Image (cartoon, rainbow, N blue to C red):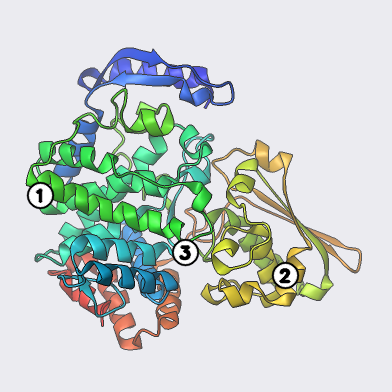
């Protein structure tokens, strides 16, 4: 969004917001390549508006299609938690929590027999869900809200809400509204913050996810609006995450930290801890500090209208890699199958995308599984060599196969003017496969499988879940029960039944 559009948007919202704000705003100096950093709308009661929504939203407010869409993300996340419980990060977290002498608690670390204090269990489960970078992602609305700027909704919210539900009898409907509230708050705050936030290196899931987890916990605990507002104030000072850590263990750490921090924020607010009550909109608050500015009309009067799961939607990943790789991977896999292409047939693959893809998919010569998740070159190469790209293809051993490393050298990843012109609300990817027989095959995709434009059914998500559960060596009987429990989640009387199915 250019500077004049941000200014126009801010004034229009301020003029129409009534009690939510005034028309005053401040103008800060900004570098010419940071146009969105210059305008900070002088609004009031933004944090209160978010808190009021979290407190007052009811299950009956959530449309049935939104409930069903949320169930798919919940099931997807549970499968990823099981798979992630077998990761190296899970072992390191276990060692850390044991070293603190606080490995006894009442909240389950999914996929294991461990029960820890809520904050540590939320952290561990969040890391497990995100460690394979296989979890759901929010779509963009405005063309300057690049895909990479947006957020992974469930990973911050679900561990905090599910852990809280284990500490008291919680019905499926109570759980659903807390989860939906958390996702809604996280996604709308992420949509509102200036693109400068992502451009300057912040990890959106890490910095915005904390508000989603806080909102979900506050809703499930029945907090008042004032208490929720204070919890947001605590949460904002724990907001953290940097894109430079993509391709390392710190990326899932940042997601797990967002889940944990929502619990900590709620706990401290409940104890009486004080914090700023205008933390989102204040001159020295979250939006200014992390983004330079924000678009109020992406947040005010938008929570639950429409719900994020309905529009713009949430994507469920078909591959365990950065979402920006998925349109290209979906299209390449289609081309491989349609044309019976083998790796030995290929001279070169050209992959064109917008410049945001190149600044996010930064691992051009990956040497391990974590780096490979942020490598377009690897993601193309492994499909050509192995014909698939599941959890087993993003391990250190798979990445270092000589055939894959050789194929990476034949993949050219570049900024394409056509993809750039398409706008950042798409992940336009243009593929050219140059074959040894002299032919060149061309493909184009804006969205990957699992996106709202090309969605997975519940049964297709269940198939992904079964694959994750099998990877974790989870009992087949339990896996089937989990799928059916989530399918009928709104009828559940006690969420602890589901949690027990996800625990040893």
Marks 2 and 3, how far apart at CA: 23 Å
Is 74 located above or below residue 24 in the figure?
below
Q: Considering only order in the chain, which callout, 1 or 2, is on the residue closer to the N terminus? A: 1
Is label 2 in a helix, a strand or a loop? helix
Residue in front for this viewpoint, 370 or 305: 370
Disc 1 + disc 3, Cβ < 8 Å = no
Is label 1 in a helix, a strand or a loop? loop
Q: Position of residue 368 (x, y in %)?
A: 59, 68
Marks 2 and 1, how far apart at CA: 53 Å
Q: Which mark is residue 134?
A: 3
Q: Considering only order in the chain, which callout, 3 or 1, is on the residue closer to the N terminus? A: 3
Horizontal side of residue 378 vs 130, given as left or right? right
Q: Which mark is residue 40?
A: none
Q: Who's the residue at 36% across and 75% down the image?
A: 82
Horizontal side of residue 230 vs 153, given as left or right? left
Q: Position of residue 152 (x, y in %)?
A: 41, 53
Is 108 located above or below residue 257 in the figure?
below
Residue most toward the right?
438
Q: Which mark is residue 405?
A: 2
Dot 1 corresponds to which residue?
222
Residue in front for this viewpoint, 315 or 100: 100
Residue in front for this viewpoint, 430 or 63: 430
Q: Position of residue 46 (x, y in %)?
A: 25, 29
């Amino acid at each position: 969004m250019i500077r004049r559009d941000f200014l126009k948007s801010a004034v229009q919202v301020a003029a129409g917001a009534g009690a939510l704000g005034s028309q005053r705003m401040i103008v800060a100096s900004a570098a010419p390549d940071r146009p969105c950093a210059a305008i900070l709308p002088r609004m009031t009661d933004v944090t209160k508006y978010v808190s009021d929504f979290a407190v007052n939203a009811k299950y009956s407010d959530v449309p049935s299609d939104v409930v069903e869409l949320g169930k798919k993300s919940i099931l997807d996340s549970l499968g990823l938690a099981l798979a992630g419980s077998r990761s190296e990060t899970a072992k390191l977290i276990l060692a850390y929590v044991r070293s603190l002498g606080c490995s006894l608690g009442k909240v389950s670390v999914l996929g294991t027999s461990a029960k820890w204090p809520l904050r540590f269990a939320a952290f561990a489960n969040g890391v497990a869900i995100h460690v394979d970078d296989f979890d759901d992602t929010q779509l963009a609305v405005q063309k300057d809200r690049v895909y990479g700027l947006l957020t992974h909704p469930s990973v911050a919210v679900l561990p905090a809400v599910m852990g809280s539900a284990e500490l008291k009898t919680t019905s499926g409907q109570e759980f659903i509204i807390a989860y939906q509230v958390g996702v809604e708050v996280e996604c709308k705050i992420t949509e509102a913050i200036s693109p400068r936030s992502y451009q300057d290196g912040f990890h959106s899931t890490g910095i915005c996810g904390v508000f989603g987890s806080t909102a979900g916990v506050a809703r499930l605990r029945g907090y008042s609006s004032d208490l929720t507002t204070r919890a947001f104030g605590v949460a904002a000072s724990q907001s953290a995450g940097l894109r430079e850590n993509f391709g390392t263990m710190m990326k899932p750490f940042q997601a797990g930290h967002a889940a944990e921090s929502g619990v900590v924020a709620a706990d401290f607010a409940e104890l009486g801890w004080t914090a700023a009550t205008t933390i989102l909109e204040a001159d020295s608050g979250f939006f200014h500090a992390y983004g330079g500015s924000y678009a109020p009309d992406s947040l005010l009067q938008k929570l639950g209208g429409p719900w994020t799961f309905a529009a713009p939607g949430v994507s469920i990943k078909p591959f365990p890699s950065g979402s920006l790789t998925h349109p290209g991977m979906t299209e390449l896999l289609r081309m491989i199958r349609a044309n019976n292409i083998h790796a030995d047939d290929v001279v070169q693959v050209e992959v064109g995308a917008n410049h945001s893809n190149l600044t996010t998919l930064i691992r051009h010569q990956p040497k391990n599984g974590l780096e490979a998740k942020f490598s377009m070159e690897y993601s193309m190469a492994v499909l050509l060599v192995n014909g698939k790209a599941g959890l087993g293809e993003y391990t250190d051993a798979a990445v270092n196969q000589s055939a894959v490393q050789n194929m990476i050298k034949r993949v050219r990843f570049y900024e394409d003017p056509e993809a750039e012109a398409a706008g950042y609300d798409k992940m336009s990817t243009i593929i050219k496969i140059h074959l040894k027989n002299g032919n060149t095959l061309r493909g184009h995709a804006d969205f990957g499988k699992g996106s709202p434009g090309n969605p997975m059914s519940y049964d297709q998500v269940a198939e992904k879940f079964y694959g994750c559960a099998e990877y974790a060596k989870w009992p087949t009987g339990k896996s089937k029960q989990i799928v059916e429990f989530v399918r009928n989640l709104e009828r559940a009387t006690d969420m602890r039944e589901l949690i027990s199915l996800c625990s040893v």
